[in-house]
Image (tube, helix red, strand yellow):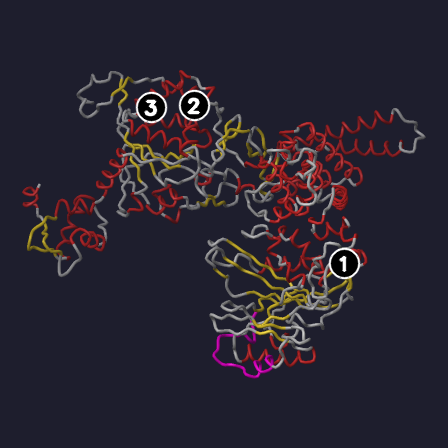
């Protein structure tokens, strides 16, 4: 949308406007209507003014000329109207400093406007065919500060809306805005995003075109209109024409009282009256604590979110009843989550329970802002946490409610790794299974009863969802891709086939159970009983549904509906994302918390070592002794053995703090392959095999739509195929992979995914890669690990092929060594876990590895090799560029073939070695063939 007028910086001063406002100061009985924000450093002088309604038109005209015609910066604010002003919305978005550009677009704004229109239609009556202007204002750029990045949106809804209604709508929006903007990576809470002060009217509104000193102004970005008909506002229609500021300057004011009128609907009259009572004439909330008794009405507290007003358990129970009764079948999750929370044992709310107690709070906050009452109900039980008790040893209603509510408002509800209602279900299932089963069955009863009333595929899919929601998830509706949770992790299942089978088995059995129960009950009743006929009809309907659950067509339709209910759009991106978790067949290792525990669905693990984790007390001592002997023979040098053991332990953790590329090198019969085979047994799914082209191919191919890339998601140990002689590393790609930069790929019939690599990259080879880069960024990542031992049938007896001076470490060859690996794997895994607990994945370099890596670098450094062979010190001599480049070109083609490097690389190297070029490099000379022998 274009603007007819847009203010720009100007040195002109509009004396008419300045004179006008200075002649109308506030004070002496004249209330403030406008202020000017001052800034001493910028030499901007503030002020406080009283512009009477009779002068407002002249004021706006002078202001328009001053700002939009004469292009002056201005810093004016205006006081809001309480009863007949427009609805004003101030959205404050805060991000981390890594965000440098706007994260929302016009689609986000359209969704927000549509949600506000729904709220206006729900609360207010307006005459049919009323047209409302909606003005969306934004700054041109985000505001980058030292500790955060800020962005914002101002919206003016051109309708007279009482401040009490604006507060009610604002409270609803805090609860619901996450449903449309949950993917914005904000760092502040939704309560902070939707400004409360503007809704209440106790802060001034920036006059259109004005700005805070040192900041940009909010200017029109989109102009919508909406028409009211049949009790609701129509879809917002964007006005495409050039926006004429002069035409709308009045309507863009917070003090404009000429917008269409509205009236509160009778269904919300009580809540409205209470909200009005809590606002004084200036739009501020009263600070008096002795308000009306109705102010503490359960429905009012629930609607306004003022849970700090809860005074006792009786009031709390009334609010919970109000909450659960308002819950529809579509949003049954709130009621169900409340029940599962109350099923948690004392470990979650009693003395010493803080860690579990606070996690329950986080999970509830992620489920619904209204579920503070559930957290409070859990916390106030007999035997609650000691810090929440009063002098009488019971829950302190006077102080603890406020303390908990203040804590609740600080929760970060937008962390993608945050806990959820699924977490609470899992805790209840794990720690109070009997109660979990009771709740689950009562939940299923509710949805089964819904199918008796209206037997549709969606209703039946809802039953299926409530039976299996903690076991199955759909990750792609388009591709019909499903996962099932069992044995501590998630398994991909073809088109949800196991869930489809559950329709004919477990779900069918649920209906048969209820048919049996009703039939048994009917046998104890007289047919004349008033409930008998209703039970007979219900039994008949249940039987009909049970038959349909065996039919292919019905099952297919139910599965189609189930996709949307089971769909989790973020599931695949969360899968195997946590680098500190490692799944074993009998549980999960948490390296951050240094413990072994059962897995849970919100771990989002799909990979597994496929072996059991053995606690240190369960070690097989003989196996441990054999493993240590194997490692001692593999790495006779103690410092190299320590390095390799720490390196292998670091593989278990998916962080890339070391940023290294380990090269296992050495001629044959040295045990490299055996070590990799043992690690394969230890890691199971976490070990991956990748082609050497991963780091030798061109950059354009990395991230291609290949399964080879996607299968590396969550992998911890990526072993490359042995390179061919002459394979050259693409240094840029190698740096990205070892440095943890995102990788993109797509498996067959799957969506493209981007993930952070967790794997330690290694290669086993007798032939080293060619690395033509000489920068430290490349070579600081290279770690050459020499396998110096030889495993022979007759050690030290073949001095011709394996002379002792060249191969001092020779050991007997055990051709059946790999038969021990299945037994060794759990023991070796436990040994590595114990070491990883100590090191947290950090690997200290050792001299042997650094020395081998340095020799590798020197061997690959053709410039150093050339200078060593062809350049010598010689006082008084000098080398010219043309001369040295001619010699270098001949030397390089003789030793390395074609594609001679650019001359700039050689010149820069000589500058570093022999000083900057000044009509030559001085005190050195070139060596020719007859001179090389003399110097060598």
Magenta stretch, residue numbers: 1-22
Q: Which of marks 3 and 1 is in front?
A: 1
Element assignment for label 3: helix
Q: Are marks 2 and 3 in contact (CB under 8 Å)?
A: no
* Residue 229 visible within the image: yes
Q: Name the residue under label 3.
A: 631
* Residue 553 visible within the image: no
CA distance separating discs 3 and 1: 76 Å
Q: Nearer the viewer, mark 2 or mark 3?
A: 3
Say which quarter of the image contains residue 15.
bottom right
| Residue at 75% from the left image edge and 52% from the top image edge | 300
Residue nearest the viewer, comparing 84 with 179? 84
Q: Name the residue under label 1.
A: 272
Element assignment for label 1: helix
Q: Main secondary structure of the magenta part?
A: loop
Q: Mark 2 points at which residue?
A: 825
Query: How far from the left and from the top, in percent, is residue 615?
Result: 48, 23
Specify few, some or many for label 1: CA neighbours under 10 Å numbering under 14, 14-19, or 20 or more.
many
Quadrant in which the N terminus is drawn: bottom right
| Left-right relation of 690 to 615 | left
Q: Is residue 723 magenta?
A: no
Quadrant in which the C terminus is drawn: top left
| Left-right relation of 802 to 595 | left
Looking at the image, is mark 2 or mark 3 earlier in the sequence?
Answer: 3
Say which quarter of the image contains residue 638.
top left
Q: Do the residues labelled 3 and 1 touch (CB within 8 Å)?
A: no
Specify few, some or many for label 3: CA neighbours under 10 Å numbering under 14, 14-19, or 20 or more.
some
CA distance separating discs 2 and 1: 68 Å
Residue nearest the viewer, comparing 563 with 910? 910
Q: Are marks 2 and 1 in contact (CB under 8 Å)?
A: no
């Amino acid at each position: 949308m274009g603007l007819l007028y847009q203010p720009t910086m100007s040195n002109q001063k509009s004396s008419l406007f300045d004179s006008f406002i200075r002649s109308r100061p506030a004070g002496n009985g004249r209330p403030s209507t406008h202020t000017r924000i001052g800034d001493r450093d910028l030499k901007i002088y503030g002020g406080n003014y009283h512009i009477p309604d009779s002068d407002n038109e002249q004021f706006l005209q002078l202001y328009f000329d001053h700002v939009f015609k004469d292009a002056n910066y201005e810093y004016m604010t205006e006081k809001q109207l309480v009863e007949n002003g427009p609805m004003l919305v101030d959205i404050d978005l805060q991000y981390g400093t890594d965000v440098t550009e706007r994260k929302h677009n016009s689609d986000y704004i359209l969704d927000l406007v549509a949600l506000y229109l729904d709220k206006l239609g729900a609360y207010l009556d307006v005459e049919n065919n009323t047209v409302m202007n909606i003005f969306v204002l934004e700054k041109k750029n985000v505001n980058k500060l030292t500790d955060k990045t800020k962005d914002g949106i101002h919206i003016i809804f051109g309708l007279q809306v009482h401040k009490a209604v604006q507060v009610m709508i604002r409270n609803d929006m805090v609860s619901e805005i996450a449903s449309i903007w949950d993917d914005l990576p904000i760092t502040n809470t939704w309560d902070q995003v939707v400004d409360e002060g503007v809704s209440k009217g106790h802060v001034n509104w920036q006059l259109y075109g004005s700005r805070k000193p040192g900041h940009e102004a909010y200017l029109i970005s989109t102009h919508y209109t909406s028409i009211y008909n049949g009790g609701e506002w129509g879809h917002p229609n964007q006005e495409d024409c050039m926006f004429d500021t002069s035409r709308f300057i009045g309507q863009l004011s917070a003090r404009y009282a000429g917008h269409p009128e509205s009236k509160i609907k009778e269904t919300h009259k009580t809540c409205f009256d209470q909200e009005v009572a809590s606002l004084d004439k200036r739009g501020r909330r009263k600070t008096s604590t002795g308000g009306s008794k109705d102010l503490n009405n359960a429905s009012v507290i629930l609607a306004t979110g003022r849970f700090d007003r809860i005074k006792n358990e009786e009031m709390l129970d009334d609010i919970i009843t109000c909450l659960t009764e308002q819950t529809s079948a579509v949003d049954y999750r709130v009621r169900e989550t409340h029940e599962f929370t109350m099923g948690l044992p004392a470990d979650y709310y009693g003395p010493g329970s803080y860690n579990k107690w606070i996690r329950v709070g986080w999970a509830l906050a992620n489920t619904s802002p209204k579920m503070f009452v559930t957290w409070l109900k859990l916390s106030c039980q007999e035997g609650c946490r000691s810090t929440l008790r009063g002098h009488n040893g019971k829950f302190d209603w006077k102080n603890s409610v406020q303390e908990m509510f203040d804590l609740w408002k600080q929760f970060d509800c937008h962390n993608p790794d945050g806990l959820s209602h699924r977490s609470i279900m899992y805790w209840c299932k794990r720690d109070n299974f009997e109660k979990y089963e009771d709740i689950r069955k009562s939940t299923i009863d509710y949805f089964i009863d819904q199918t008796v009333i209206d037997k549709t595929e969606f209703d039946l899919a809802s039953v299926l969802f409530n039976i299996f929601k903690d076991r199955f998830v759909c990750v792609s509706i388009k591709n019909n891709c499903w996962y099932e949770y069992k044995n501590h992790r998630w398994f991909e299942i073809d088109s949800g086939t196991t869930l489809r089978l559950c329709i004919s088995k477990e779900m069918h059995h649920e209906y048969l159970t209820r048919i049996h129960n009703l039939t048994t009950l009917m046998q104890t009743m007289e047919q004349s009983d008033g409930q008998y006929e209703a039970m007979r009809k219900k039994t008949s309907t249940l039987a009909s549904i049970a038959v349909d659950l065996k039919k292919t067509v019905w099952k297919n339709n139910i599965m189609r509906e189930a996709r949307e209910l089971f769909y989790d759009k973020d599931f695949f991106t969360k899968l195997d994302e946590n680098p500190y978790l490692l799944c074993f067949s009998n549980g999960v290792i948490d390296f951050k918390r240094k413990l072994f525990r059962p897995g849970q669905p919100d771990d989002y693990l799909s990979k597994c070592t496929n072996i059991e984790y053995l606690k240190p007390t369960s070690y097989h001592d003989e196996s441990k002794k054999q493993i240590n002997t194997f490692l001692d023979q593999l790495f006779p040098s103690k410092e190299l053995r320590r390095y390799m053991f720490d390196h292998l332990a670091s593989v278990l953790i998916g962080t890339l703090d070391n940023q290294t590329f380990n090269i296992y090198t050495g001629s044959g019969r040295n045990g490299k392959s055996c070590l990799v085979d043992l690690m394969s047994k230890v890691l199971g799914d976490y070990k991956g095999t990748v082609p050497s082209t991963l780091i030798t191919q061109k950059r354009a191919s990395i991230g291609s739509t290949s399964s080879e890339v996607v299968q590396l998601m969550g992998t911890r140990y990526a072993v490359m195929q042995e390179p061919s002689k002459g394979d050259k590393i693409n240094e840029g790609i190698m740096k990205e992979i070892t440095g943890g930069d995102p990788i993109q790929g797509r498996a067959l019939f799957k969506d493209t995914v981007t993930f952070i690599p967790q794997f330690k990259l290694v290669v086993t080879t007798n032939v080293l890669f060619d690395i033509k880069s000489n920068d430290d960024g490349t070579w600081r990542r290279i770690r050459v690990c020499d396998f110096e031992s030889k495993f022979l049938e007759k050690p030290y007896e073949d001095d011709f092929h394996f002379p002792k001076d060249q191969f001092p470490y020779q050991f007997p060859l055990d051709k059946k060594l790999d038969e021990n690996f299945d037994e060794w794997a759990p023991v070796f895994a436990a040994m590595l876990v114990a070491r990883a607990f100590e090191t947290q994945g950090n690997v200290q370099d050792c001299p042997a590895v650094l020395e081998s890596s340095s020799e590798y670098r020197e061997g690959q450094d053709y410039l150093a090799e050339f200078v060593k062979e062809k350049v010598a010190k010689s006082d008084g001599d000098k080398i010219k560029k043309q001369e040295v480049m001619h010699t270098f070109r001949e030397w390089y083609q003789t030793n390395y073939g074609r594609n001679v490097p650019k001359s700039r690389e050689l010149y820069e190297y000589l500058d570093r070695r022999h000083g900057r070029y000044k009509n030559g490099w001085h005190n050195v000379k070139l060596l020719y063939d007859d001179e090389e022998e003399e110097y060598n």
